[in-house]
Image: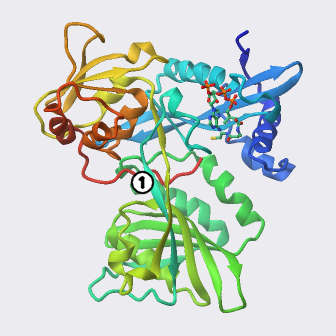
Amino acid sequence: MNPDVRVLDADQLRSAHMLFAATIHRGPVDDQRWSHTATTYSPGRTLGIHHGSALVATATSIPSKLVVPGGAVLPMAAVTRVGVRADHTRSGLLTAMMRTQLDDVAARGEPVATLRASEARIYGRFGYGVATRGRDLTVNAERASWRPGAPLGGSVRLLDRDEILPTMRDVYETFALNRVGSITRPDRWWQSMFGHRIDDREPALGVVHTGSGGDDGFAIAFRTSATGFAEQTLEIADLQAADVQATAGLWRFLLGVDLITSVRTELRPLDEPLELLLGDPRACVVTGQHDETWLRLVDVPAALAARSYGPADPVLLAVHDPLLEKNAGVYRIADGSAEFVGPLGGPVAPELECDAAALAMAYLGDRTPSQLVATGWWSAPDPGAVRRADAAFATAEVPWCGTYF
Ligand SMILES: CC(C)(COP(=O)(O)OP(=O)(O)OC[C@H]1O[C@@H](n2cnc3c(N)ncnc32)[C@H](O)[C@@H]1OP(=O)(O)O)[C@@H](O)C(=O)NCCC(=O)NCCS
């Protein structure tokens, strides 16, 4: 029997949140925490499956927007808080929720959905592919001298505690949507992400960078551990910078704070040039590299038409999508645009073929078609098309989101 997936009412959201928290092995939220979290649920977007009267599966999404190559900003469903109670897993509940959610997102006219995956083996089957990645860094502040000639950056000012969230929010909006892969942050996101840490009086540093054109970067960092008074670690929870000058200015400041011997951070852009700025590049140690954005092209014709393409002779790309059949077809990518030119198995013979997840891996520019053909994610009935596809899908910068949800 097909599981009965329902849209939850507002008075069921706290139970849904508790269920999700339990599936990722977190404790229940108290009233204060829930007051921050409740506002991050969007009405009518949380799904649930019951067993008897008990809620046993849930998933939600939040409306946001995603920047795609060329600068277009697409409505996006930010999928999150997905969980199935441990005694009901592997019986198709997630599959039922994902189908319902994809139909719902399509009906809302959101051509793309993204999520962060707890495990890499869950979402590919639903057409999600890794579209941005990031690296974790630990920097030894005592060894982090600056290379002569490295950008100096502008000035950095420290924010009062109650200024941190509104100031960061305002600065984010001035430049963050210039980067491919970045997303809008709803007002309530700031409070739910950092509000409890600030309210709990965790040691926090909030700073803004000002360059020649005004405020163009910010960071929030928390002191997370101390081995004695003079050996303390800062964790950068968010650092956004409009350019290399702002990046340099913020890192110079954070690495120069007295009594801090180590600075840690996660999921930074793959192209953040920290090692190029340091006199001793080994002061910066890459401690991990992970998938960041999992992207689902929900409306493939709209998503393909929305991004820009590099100059290249036409490419005929077949897209397979058994979950959302209306996406299936052959697309012609040429002259900086993309259009549907025929059904699969029809008169237009494709030169390249992929499924929705593998298309997502190239869509923002994280992977090239030639990498995907070489590793079997895409097939190439006409190998001569691979170079043309590389030229068409090429992007000038490495995509990165930088927003956790
Ligand atoms: C991940 C989770 C939501 C999957 O839910 P589920 O109801 O068990 O998923 P389904 O039964 O619909 O599984 C669909 C398919 O995915 C596979 N699958 C699901 N979760 C998987 C996992 N963690 N690892 C590997 N395969 C997985 C199933 O084996 C199944 O494969 P099949 O169709 O070949 O049999 C659930 O295990 C869970 O709540 N985990 C803990 C919380 C969590 O990680 N949430 C995700 C946050 S991003």
Q: How is the image coloured?
A: rainbow
| Horizontal arrangement in the rendering, residue 404 relative to residue 350 (left or right) | right
Labels in figure, total: 1
* Label 1, ligand 1: CB separation under 8 Å: no
Task: Look at 36% across and 32% down and name the residue there.
Answer: 359
Task: Look at 62% across and 45% down and name the residue there.
Answer: 118
Q: Residues within 10 Å of mark 1 (few under 14, many from 20)?
A: many
Question: Where does residue 380 sit, x and y in percent of width and height?
Answer: 24, 29
- Foreground of the two, 66 or 332: 332
Q: Which residue is mark 1?
A: 176
- Foreground of the two, 373 or 241: 373
Furthest toward the left, the residue is 313
User: Split into 4 quadrants, where in the image is the N terminus?
Assistant: top right
* Vertical placement of residue 303 versus 151, above or below: above
| Horizontal arrangement in the rendering, residue 164 relative to residue 5 (left or right) | left
Residue 263: image quadrant is bottom right
* Vertical placement of residue 142 versus 356, above or below: below
| Horizontal arrangement in the rendering, residue 248 relative to residue 234 (left or right) | left
**What is the three-letter code of the residue carrying label 1?**
Ala
Ligand 1 located in image quadrant: top right
Question: Where does residue 332 sit, x and y in percent of width and height?
Answer: 20, 23
* Vertical placement of residue 185 versus 298, above or below: below
- Foreground of the two, 159 or 227: 227
Task: Look at 38% across and 33% down and name the residue there.
Answer: 358
Question: Where does residue 378 sit, x and y in percent of width and height?
Answer: 32, 32
User: Judging from the image, what secondary structure is the residue with disc 1 in?
Assistant: helix
Question: Where does residue 335 sit, x and y in percent of width and height?
Answer: 13, 31
| Horizontal arrangement in the rendering, residue 171 relative to residue 27 (left or right) | left
Task: Look at 55% across and 86% down and name the residue there.
Answer: 257
